[in-house]
Each structure stands twice: as C-alpha cells, then as structure tokens.
C-alpha cells in the first residue's frame, strides 16, 4: 500500500525528520490566508503516481492570489488518470544541494538496502548505476554510525550537515522497520545552509503485513478509476504511459508482451491480464476499457487454455460492431478453439497471427505509421 506524500511526511516528523512547513487542503478555501503567513510556496498534487512534476502536478507561487489560481488549476486536473482531491502547500526552500535517499528490499540478498545519490530530484531509475551508493543492511544490527559516516563522506557533505544526515539515516531505517515498509524514500533531501529537509516523501508498505499495521496508518485506495472499473469485472489492469494498448490472458504472457513491445522500440499503454477463464462478455468489457484510454494501436495476445480463442474473437467482433475502432488492431490467437477463432476474424476481414514476435512487429510498424502491415489495419 502506497501512502500519499503528506502521510509519509507526518510519519517522518513523528520520528524527528524535518520537513518543510506545510498544510494539506481539499479545496482552494483557506489557501490564500495560509500563504500570507509563509510567503512563496510550492503546491503539490497528492496523487500516488510518480513523475508529478513532469506531468504538471506541481506548481509554484509567490503571492497568495497566484497560489489560489494554481490550486484551482490543479483541483480541476486529472493527473495520470487520477483526480486531484488534495493539495500539499509548502514553503519554498532555498536549495544549496539535493540528495536522493531511500531504503528498499533487495530480494536477491533478502535484506534491506540503503540507497543514496548526489543526483537528488531525479527518478532513481534514471540515475546511472555508478552514481548510486548501495549498502546492504544486516537486520540484526541495523544502520550503524560507520555506515552513515561513509555515506555522508561519499555524498560530499561534512560538518554539521554530515551529523544531521547521519542521524536522519538512522531514523529513516527505524521508520522502514517499524512500518513494515517495502520502500521509504526522500527525493530530494534538500540541504539549505546547515539545515536539511525531507522535501518529498514516499512510503510503500508491505500488504502482507497489513494484519499488523499500526492504528495510525490510514487505508489508501491506490487504483485509478479505470483500474477500479477493471477490478469490478475481475480484470487485472494497470495504467501505463505508452502508445500500444495491450490485452493478454495471464500475468506472465502479459509481462512478456510488454517486454517485447519495449524491445521493439515502443511502450505499452497499459498492463491488462484478462485472466485464464474470461467470458465473452468480460473480454468485450475489457476491450471497451482499453479503447477508452485512447491508445494509438491495440495488441490482443491470447494463448487459449481455459480462455477459448473463439470467445475472444466473438467478443472483439461484438465491440467492433458497437464501437468505432479507428486505430490499428493486431490479434494473436493460439490454443483452444484457435481455428474457430481465426475463421470468425477472417470472416470479418481481420487476420490473426500465430507468432507473437510477428504480431509485435506488426503492431509497432502500424503504430509508427510505416505502413508495412496495412492488411491488418481495421479501418
């Protein structure tokens, strides 16, 4: 379970980690008066998606009037499929240096791993490996002072800042253990003079430990509206940011399909696992969800076991008759009732691939408008 930034920061403060002065608002009311007391502010959308800044979910304001205007814009926006219902309004910090700090689980070593980098403010996935400090933590002893001193030295901080950073790292590990976390992250940790602030905060808790979650942890619903809609019909669905809508049956085949699309130079618009026994009606509803995301193309990859290829084919034809499909569609059907499914598609002018690499090559070519496979383009 992910926590909103303001929730993570409340936990940080309760453990002695300093955060910028801020307040959470669920409407523009009261923001003007609050900003009058603290001056220039940063206004942050409270959504669970990453990359809020790039998506326009973080605004800056120097006056109360400007803050109210920016807040109204954010409340009226959709950020990566999620409505913005709360805003965190914080004082704008003077930044001398930004650092990344995080604790996660290294599953290969079955230990917590402490991560640090001078490249604060960047998504850690985008930071070159040689710029990331990694230290595995022995859970029997926790984070020791010699570890924190080494990390401070490698981050290039010294004196009073190094002392505060060492103390913060110990507290961060205490939070990680106390709350059964999978991830605790500060990105960035801001150094301002001799002070340090957790300018952002992220926490993900282990769902398998939910039976012993502390009473001060609120339940957070992570799903977007589309994810909730898919869940209601028994479909596993996750919003992504690519161009190609994907439906497959089974988590493994879906992930493999996403990886192949990536290998061929593009990205999936979503993860959708229709399951091993999805009915014709369920498949039709799943297709309608996919089309509502406005992908540039659609790839259906079915390995028929319990799910019958002819039922998938019929479901696609049902949707095609009721909804205008004006994007390229590539279908791969293999398995139970494969021949019947292919016949249904061919009767409606649609070809089906047997080889998934051929199908991915086709959908990528169509998406890129190279025109190499227009015989599969459903006009």
Image: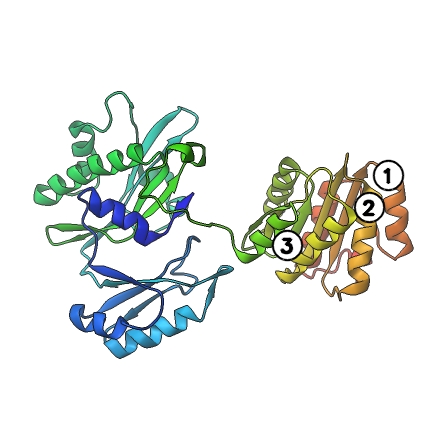
Taking the image as shown, residue 126 lies to the left or right of residue 230, namely: left
Which element is circle 1 on? Answer: loop
x, y percentage for residue 261?
63, 47
Number of the front mark, 3 or 2: 2
Between 119 and 60, the one nearer to me in the picture: 60
Q: Residue at x 64, y 62 (%)?
A: 292
Local SS, label 3: strand
**CA distance for labels 1 and 3:** 26 Å
Residue 11 in the figure: left or right of residue 250: left
Q: Secondary structure at mark 2?
A: helix
Name which residue lies at 64% across and 46% down.
235
Q: Is residue 104 above or below residue 49?
A: above
Is residue 121 placed above or below 336 in the rendered structure?
below
- Check contact, mark 1 vs mark 2: CB within 8 A: yes
In percent of width and height, residue 59 lies at: 33, 67
- State the image coordinates of residue 328 (x, y, percent, origin top left): 73, 59
Residue at the front extreme of this rendering = 215
Is residue 248 found left or right of 41 in the rendered image? right
**What's the CA distance linking mark 1 and mark 2?**
9 Å
- Which one is in front in this view, the residue at disc 1 or the one at disc 2? 2
- Dot 1, how many residues are within 10 Å of its Cα: few (below 14), some (14-19), or many (20+)? some
Q: Which residue is mark 2?
A: 311
Q: Residue furthest top?
A: 140
Image color mode = rainbow
- Mark carried by residue 244: 3
Point out the tag, 3 or 2, that comes first from the N-terminus.
Answer: 3
Residue at 74% from the left image edge and 56% from the top image edge = 329
**How far across and how far down the image is residue 209, in percent?**
41, 32
Quadrant showing the N terminus: top left
Which residue is denoted by mark 1 in the rendering? 337
* Residue drawn 29% across the image and 69% down it: 60
């Amino acid at each position: 379970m992910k926590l909103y930034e303001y929730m993570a920061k409340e936990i940080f403060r309760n453990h002695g980690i300093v955060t910028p002065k801020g307040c959470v608002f669920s409407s523009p009311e009261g923001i003007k008066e609050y900003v009058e007391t603290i001056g220039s502010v940063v206004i942050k959308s409270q959504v669970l998606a990453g990359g809020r800044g790039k998506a326009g979910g973080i605004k800056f304001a120097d006056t109360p009037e400007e803050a109210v205007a920016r807040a109204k814009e954010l409340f009226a926006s959709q950020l990566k499929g999620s409505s913005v219902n709360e805003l965190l309004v914080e004082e704008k910090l003077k930044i001398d240096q930004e650092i990344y700090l995080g604790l996660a689980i290294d599953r290969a070593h079955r230990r917590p791993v402490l991560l640090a980098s001078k490249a604060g403010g960047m998504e850690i996935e985008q930071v070159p490996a040689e710029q990331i400090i990694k230290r595995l933590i022995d859970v029997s002893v926790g984070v020791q002072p010699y570890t924190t001193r080494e990390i401070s030295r490698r981050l290039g901080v010294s004196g009073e800042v190094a002392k505060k950073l060492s103390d913060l790292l110990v507290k961060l590990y205490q939070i990680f253990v106390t709350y059964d976390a999978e991830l605790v992250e500060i990105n960035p940790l801001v150094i301002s003079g001799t002070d340090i602030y957790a300018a952002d905060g992220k926490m993900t808790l282990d769902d398998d430990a939910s039976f012993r979650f502390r009473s001060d942890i609120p339940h957070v619903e992570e799903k977007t509206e589309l994810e909730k809609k898919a869940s209601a019909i028994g479909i596993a669905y996750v919003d992504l940011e690519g161009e190609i809508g994907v439906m497959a049956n089974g988590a493994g085949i879906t992930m493999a399909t996403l990886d192949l699309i990536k290998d061929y130079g593009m990205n999936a618009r979503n993860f959708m696992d229709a399951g091993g026994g999805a009915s014709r009606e369920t498949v039709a509803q799943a297709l309608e969800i996919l089309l509502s995301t406005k992908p540039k193309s659609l790839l259906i990859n079915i390995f028929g076991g319990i799910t019958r290829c002819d039922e998938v084919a019929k479901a696609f034809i049902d949707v095609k008759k009721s909804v205008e499909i004006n994007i390229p569609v590539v279908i791969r059907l293999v398995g139970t009732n494969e021949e019947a499914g292919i016949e249904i598609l061919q009767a409606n002018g649609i070809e089906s691939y047997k080889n998934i690499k051929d199908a991915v090559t086709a959908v990528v070519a169509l998406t890129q408008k190279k025109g190499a496979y227009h015989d599969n383009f459903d006009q």
